[in-house]
Amino acid sequence: MANENYLAAMKIKRRYEDSLLLKKGVVGCGVGLDEQGKPGVVIYVSGEHHGIPRRLDGIGVSTEEIQPDEKWANDGCATAASIEDLDNVVQGEKVASLRSRNKIDAAVAKPTSPDLVVPEILGLGIPKGTREACVGMQVRKSGRTTEVSDGIVRACDVSLFVDYPSAGGRAALFVEQIATTPMAETGDSGSLTVDTDLRAVGLLFAQACNLTLHNRIQNVLDALDVEIWDDELTPELQEKIVQIRREHRNGKKRTERWRPMPMGVSIGHYRGATGTAACLVKDRRTGEILILSNAHVLAMPTQL
């Protein structure tokens, strides 16, 4: 988002954000393209709405109708974590909160042994660092349900109310999110979003009919105090990855038990919430290897 026009649009969006979110029918706003294809403010609406400005301080404004269905709100998962689960700090690991102005829905799981997991994301490979999202960027993800799918970033710095059905339909405001074209279905929550060079961009956590929402990856890493796994591949690890790729080519399903376990496969809490293992990360303080996914998928650290 280094482009000056986008930065100007972001500044104006943030200036008017609070008042926009109070308008009837407005569920969010972000920075994307206006009706002339120039950087501008995107206002997300649902149902009856009025009073939407056409310009803000000289910056164009466009509106986009959110088309919610049973998949909206972290996949509309009936087993998504409760407010109490998400608010808890479990064994010292910070997880997402349903309080105001959330930036992440993310948590980590600890494998019983580092030997049980590999950094390979099925169908993609091993992620290579991080990158900031920008409007128009091509992105990919590998999830347990729709496997590898592609999308285009439509807006950045998105602030949007997301309903949590399992929390009595209460909505949580998420800020600094990334909105892409639809690229997920139920069970894909927790997938790592990468660019075409396999650099991590976001963490997928919610889906509507006409867009997919992702946490900004740097917010996730900073909140959990972790980094994307980037160790050298040992001969033993390379052999395990060759084995994983062979099993994948032979049709092994992502919902089956994998040993060693790659990323991009099914993971969840024993109480029933299920999503996707995003990638391996390392604790910045201890170097411990952990598995990244959504808080509403893991609910609390999961032992494999």
Image (cartoon, rainbow, N blue to C red):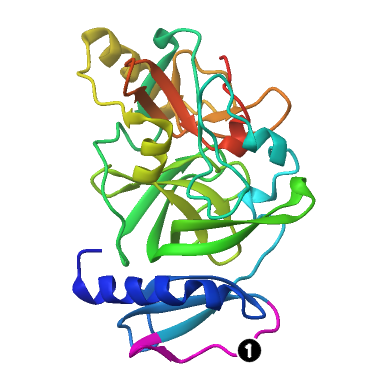
6 relative to 97, above or below: below
Could you tell me which residue is drawn at 66 percent across and 78 percent down? 25
Secondary structure under badge 1? loop
The quarter of the picture where residue 233 lies is top left
Query: Which of 203 and 238 lies nearest the eye of the viewer?
Result: 203
64 relative to 254, above or below: below
Give the magenta range. 47-60
172 relative to 6, above or below: above
Instruction: List x then y, in percent, for residue 237.
Output: 29, 13
Q: Is residue 53 magenta?
A: yes
Query: In the picture, which quadrant includes the C terminus?
Result: top right
Query: In the picture, which quadrant includes the N terminus?
Result: bottom left
Instruction: List x then y, in percent, for residue 7.
Output: 26, 70
State the residue lying farthest toward the right. 168
Instruction: List x then y, in percent, for residue 302.
Output: 58, 20
Q: Is residue 193 visible?
A: no
The quarter of the picture where residue 163 lies is bottom right
Instruction: List x then y, in percent, for residue 298.
Output: 60, 30
Chief secondary structure of the magenta portion = loop
Query: Which of 74 and 301 lies nearest the eye of the viewer?
Result: 301
Q: Is residue 63 left or right of residue 283?
A: right
Q: Is residue 35 magenta?
A: no
According to the picture, the residue beneath numbered tag 1 turns out to be 50
The amino acid at mark 1 is: His
Q: Can residue 302 be seen in this view?
A: yes
Count of marks, rendered view: 1
Could you tell me which residue is drawn at 32 percent across and 58 percent down? 138
The quarter of the picture where residue 81 lies is top right
8 relative to 174, above or below: below
Other-residue count near label 1 (Cα within 10 Å), few / some / many at <14 / 14–19 / ≥20: few
Could you tell me which residue is drawn at 66 percent across and 84 percent down? 49
